[in-house]
Image (tube, rainbow, N blue to C red):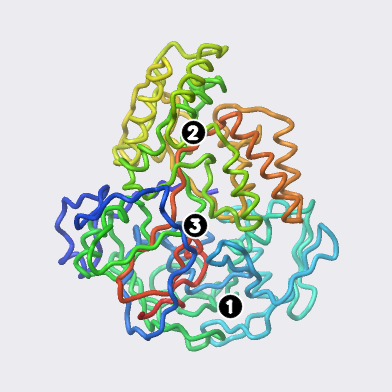
Amino acid sequence: MKLRTTVAAAGLAGAMALTTACSGADTTRPAGGGATADAAQLTLTSTTAKAKGEVATVNWLLEDEPDSLDLDTQGGSAGRTVLSNVCERLYQLQPDMSVQPSLVRQATRPDARTLVLALRDDVLFHDGSAMTADDVLFSLRRHARPDMEQSDEFDNVAEMTRTGDLEITITFKQPDALFTKALAGDAGLVYNREQVEKSGKDFGTPGQPDACSGPYRLGDWKSGDSIVINRSDTYRGEKPLTRQIVFRWADDSAMVNALKTGAADGTYADSISTAAALRGTKGLDQHYGPSTAALALIPTERGGLADPDVRRALALALDRAGIARSGYGGLVEPWATPVGSGAWGYEKGAFAAAQKQLTGAPARPGADDIAEAKKLVENAEAAPDKPIVIGTDSSQGRLVIANAVRAALQQIGLKGQIKTVPPAEYGEFYGDKQARADIDVLVADWYISKSDPIGFYDNGLSDSSNNWVGFRSPEYDSKVKEAMRTLDDKQRAALVIDVQRRFSEAAVWIPVAQMPTALVIDDKLTGPPASMAYLYYPWAAALGAK
């Protein structure tokens, strides 16, 4: 589970700052006179057109400078955007959000609790040495250490051993349906053991080489200025068309200005408002792809939304279409679940049909929805008699949602009060119970790192640290755990759809909209995926001239 709470750097780094330092760009509305998008008509595509020509250097923007390029010690989308091109994983998330073996040649399951990974024999690290089973085992055990970012992905692992020259066997305490999906994420990164040990505690810092095998190798990292990656001569696959990528970082306003002036060639916009501000800008293309990210309201422990009937009433009365238009330039889509369609990495048709069956979160509430919501409040066992406090920061999108929540509450006979805090303080709401003690509901954006909805719905488990409202259901808990043990995709999808219905009916969280991935790129360039896969898939390897 991942939170989108990163505060961007104050400005654009390095020489680019000279051309983009002007401020005042409106990062919430289309630039260049472009019209607001119609969320209902927004088409999500996994890929862009295939590139045909070589490019010497592409300048790419990140939301901020990575604290480290060791993803075991410091995760984050900026570091992943760089390293997805440098470091390979045992499995690979595809642009369509499915998962396939990568450094694994073949995977077999002798039984439900055993996974045997036969490794490729043609993988070279960037120093020219061959990948071995010892490197893979070292990497997995490093990821599993309690102090590492991915340690929770190994909670169900009983043992990991080398069982052949190019073979690793993993045994589980119980069947684990999500483990191979985790191996397509940071839990599956494979490092050159010798290089990691040589770098020691400095691994992942400026001046240190990478320890990977991807299509690009890490070049110069000038702290505070830029990170460079260069095409690797040792890569076994197709040669990338772009020889060098130079990464710099910017906040939203500086990013908009850099892309408008041509100082930068592209970005995966961390904030959808950045893409909205650039709609219609001459010389730029925009592509929108599937993502697991969603906007949602999370009720807190304070109790203003403790009654499920009151939560259901708010879900019915919320104007999601108005939020999409006013807060996000029409680039988010009203949605009935708190996880985006990018999570549908399998059985897409079943999940799409199930989403349409959920009626408790209309895009634009009608008179019947409001009437039903009022009745729910009237019949609620514990309707609040004090204002419901809505926690947000001052960003345009969240403020629009907060005001929409207050308006919805008023329509159903309740009062709302908005509490606005600075972005740094806002981020504390997620992890600190005391920080959110004075709010009843948090305006949140959220994504999961795996392309499986069950990776979200564990938030509703009775003992989940993210189940702030105190939802308790033994049946729900049992269904979630059964889904996590079910290896067959079709059977697991049926279980997840049942879990999704229970979560929605209880309104444990209140869904608002799904947020697509937004790729903004110079109109002379093409090739990278448009989906959220860019965080784990070597997107720059496909980048080139039209």
Residue 164: quadrant of the picture: bottom right
Q: Residue furthest front?
A: 367
Q: Nearer the viewer, residue 277 or 21?
A: 277
Q: Secondary structure at mark 1?
A: helix
Is residue 436 at least partly visible in the picture?
A: no
Q: Position of residue 49 (x, y in %)?
A: 43, 74
Residue 503 against residue 130 in the figure, above or below? above
Q: State if disc 3 and disc 2 touch (CB < 8 Å).
A: no
Residue visible at 53% across and 25% down in the picture: 312
Q: Position of residue 397 (x, y in %)?
A: 33, 41
Q: Which residue is mark 2?
A: 298
Q: Which residue is mark 1?
A: 194
User: Horizontally, is 257 left or right of 75 in the view?
Assistant: left
Residue visible at 45% across and 57% down in the picture: 76
Q: Which residue is mark 3?
A: 290
Q: Secondary structure at mark 2?
A: strand
Residue visible at 33% across and 51% down in the picture: 37
Q: State if disc 2 and disc 1 touch (CB < 8 Å).
A: no
Q: Residue furthest right?
A: 111
Is residue 269 at least partly visible in the picture?
A: yes
Front tag of 2 and 3: 3
Q: Amino acid at mark 3?
A: Pro
Residue 181 against residue 358 in the figure, above or below? below
Q: Amino acid at mark 1?
A: Glu
Cα gap from disc 2 to disc 3, whole angstroms = 23 Å
Q: Amino acid at mark 2?
A: Ile
Q: Nearer the viewer, residue 492 or 390?
A: 492
Residue 45 against residue 334 in the figure, above or below? below
